[in-house]
Image (tube, helix red, strand yellow):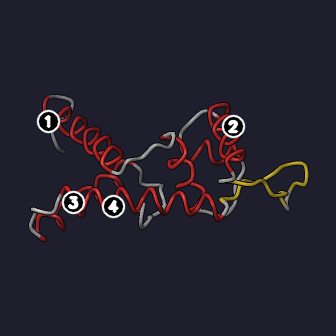
Amino acid sequence: MHASTVGTEGQEILSGLIDIITALKRRAGEREDPATVFLLRHLRASAPRRVSDLAECSRLDVSTVSRHVKSLEEAGYVTRIEDPDDRRASLLKITKQGQSLYDAAMGARSAALDRGLADWSDKDRHTLAVLVTRAARSLNPSAETRSNT
């Protein structure tokens, strides 16, 4: 068993992760509400799903997700379709416009990461990828393995 990372090391890891995400969004010139790309990521990774399912997988309150989904619908990024198992309910599905926005945001973030790590060796970049992926899987073992996320 490893010692707790609650102390300085854990704080450094958390601070570093927050700084990385913040820098990538800034360098990518992202102007979207942070929830937009986050929720589109969950919708593109699966078949159409109910708002309650989206809230559960994103670990947000249903009312919070419902509010964001309304904005996503108004922007044309998601659409509702009839639930074939329960015609009273609807499922959310990412639209082509939503997929395009997601792809553009992730492409910009990826390019920003490439620029930021341009002076890193291939070995160091590979090591970072392995460790970040391992940490993500350890912290969220039930999550699907995703590529380009």
Residue ID for mark 3: 115
- SS of the residue under disc 4: helix
Question: Separation of disc 1 and disc 3 at Cα?
Answer: 27 Å
Q: Is residue 2 above or below residue 120?
A: above
Q: Is residue 76 visible?
A: yes
Point out the tag, 1 or 3, that comes first from the N-terminus: 1
Mark 1 vs mark 3, foreground winner is 3
The residue at 20%/32% (across/down) is: 11
Q: Tell me the amino acid under the disc marked 4.
A: Ser
Question: Separation of disc 2 and disc 4 at Cα?
Answer: 29 Å
The residue at 60%/43% (across/down) is: 56
Q: Tell me the amino acid under the disc marked 2.
A: Ser
Point out the tag, 4 or 3, that comes first from the N-terminus: 4
Mark 2 vs mark 1, foreground winner is 2
Mark 4 vs mark 1, foreground winner is 4
Residue ID for mark 1: 9
Q: Is residue 7 above or below residue 58?
A: above
Residue ID for mark 2: 66
Question: Separation of disc 4 and disc 1 at Cα?
Answer: 27 Å
Residue ID for mark 4: 110
Q: Tell me the amino acid under the disc marked 3.
A: Arg
Q: Are marks 2 and 4 in contact (CB under 8 Å)?
A: no
